[in-house]
Image (spheres, rainbow, N blue to C red):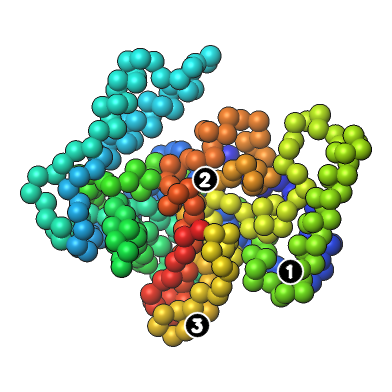
Amino acid sequence: MTRTTPPRPLDVEALFPELAGHRGTTTRLHPRPGSPTAVDSSVGGPLLWPVDEAWPVCTEAHKRGRGRRPSDIHRERRVLAEAWAREGTTGPTDEERLLLEELERKHRVVGIGETDPLPMIGVAQLYRRDIPDLLAGPGDCDLLQVFWCPFDAHGRSGYGMSLDLRWRRSWEVGEVLVSPPLPQVVGYAGYVAEPCVLYPEQVVTYPFAGLLPEELRERIYAREDAFEEEEEAEDRDGDGDSSDGDAAGPPMYQYDLSIPPGWRAGGFASWHLTDAHVMKCSACSTPMELLLTIDSSEWDGGSGSWQPLEERGLPPHRFATPTEVTVGRWGELNIFACPADPGHPHGRSIQ
């Protein structure tokens, strides 16, 4: 089944024709639970990794001997999903609650040192053949693979994430590693992705308002203020029609008209948490481009207009968080690449 983004609530270029000059595209990945294989683009699925190549590991000094077992995290999610899927259910049974308490326990790994090689978790792999807006990798590489350490314990703060992005030529891989190493415990369940197949869809996108020319940005803000005032006046006069229960309010540039939520490749980054700025390559100072967005949800209360047509009216808890990945405090990770040299270090921003 495909996933189709609904038409936007209004034609933003009709209101602001200058936006046509800033128009771009992004590919919504639409990850959904499934059984991907190593030859598929996926989130949380098996990777096309050569059997004779060392698996990525984290050797940065940090505690790594206490946490939850990945198998317990996956099982906990299955128990909860089955419990809430039962018709007329009020949630887990008493027996299931006892099991969930056991699955939530943390465990210790005896004898592991703070710099012992810790297997990273394979988060996603993307084939360029499947993703129209995936930026080109070094040379003729056609496959991007994303890894991260399952502990928030890196960098100067001691609370950051550690990423490892690998590009490769898929046709050069011979025998594939079937059972990659896994960390015995993880520090954060949000780093453990559920296997998801992808339903890529290319959609139109526009830059974050804070990066638009000031005059255009201010006119967009003024139009939104006018929308809100008109709606408030209708409510006061009793003319507002709320019979459909839609309390979303008037369309907003940030939430409804410019940048879609969810996992996606290419396009423009959102800067809703920090000041908007142009990311520059640490190696050559070239303005970087968005490579990949890893999001904690596919939509939420403020971005529900992007919910695919095929999933309208379905229970949101089954589709809004399909990967079970959580970035920070329910945010998103934007990963940037240098267009001058894809081999240069990647940039990132958590929003």
Give the amino acid type for the residue marked by disc 1 in the picture: Arg
Q: Position of residue 319 (x, y in %)?
A: 54, 37
Q: Is residue 249 left or right of residue 54?
A: right
Residue hosting label 3? 286
* Element type where label 2 sits in the image: loop
Quote the CA–CA distance across marks 3 and 2.
31 Å
Of callouts 2 and 1, which one flags the residue occurring earlier in the amino acid sequence? 1
Within-10-Å neighbours for mark 2: few <14, some 14–19, many 20+: many
Q: Earlier in the sequence, mark 3 or mark 1?
A: 1
Answer above or below: position of 71 versus 142: above
Mark 2, mark 1: which one is toward the viewer?
1
Q: Residue furthest front?
A: 236
Where residue 267 sits, quadrant-wise, is: bottom right
Q: Amino acid at mark 2?
A: Ser
Q: Position of residue 272 (x, y in %)?
A: 58, 59
The residue furthest left is 111
Q: Is residue 218 left or right of residue 166?
A: right
Residue 83 in sight in this render: yes
Between 177 and 171, which is closer to the camera in this rendering?
Answer: 177
Determine whether, in the image, residue 320 is placed left or right of residue 344: right
Tell me residue 95's x, y (percent): 32, 15
Q: What residue is disc 1 on?
A: 217
Question: Which disc is residue 297 wearing?
Answer: 2
C-alpha gap between disc 3 and disc 1: 25 Å
Instruction: Please give the name of the residue rendered at 87% of the width and 49% of the height, measured from the top-left corner.
Output: 230
Residue that sits furthest to the bottom in the current view: 284
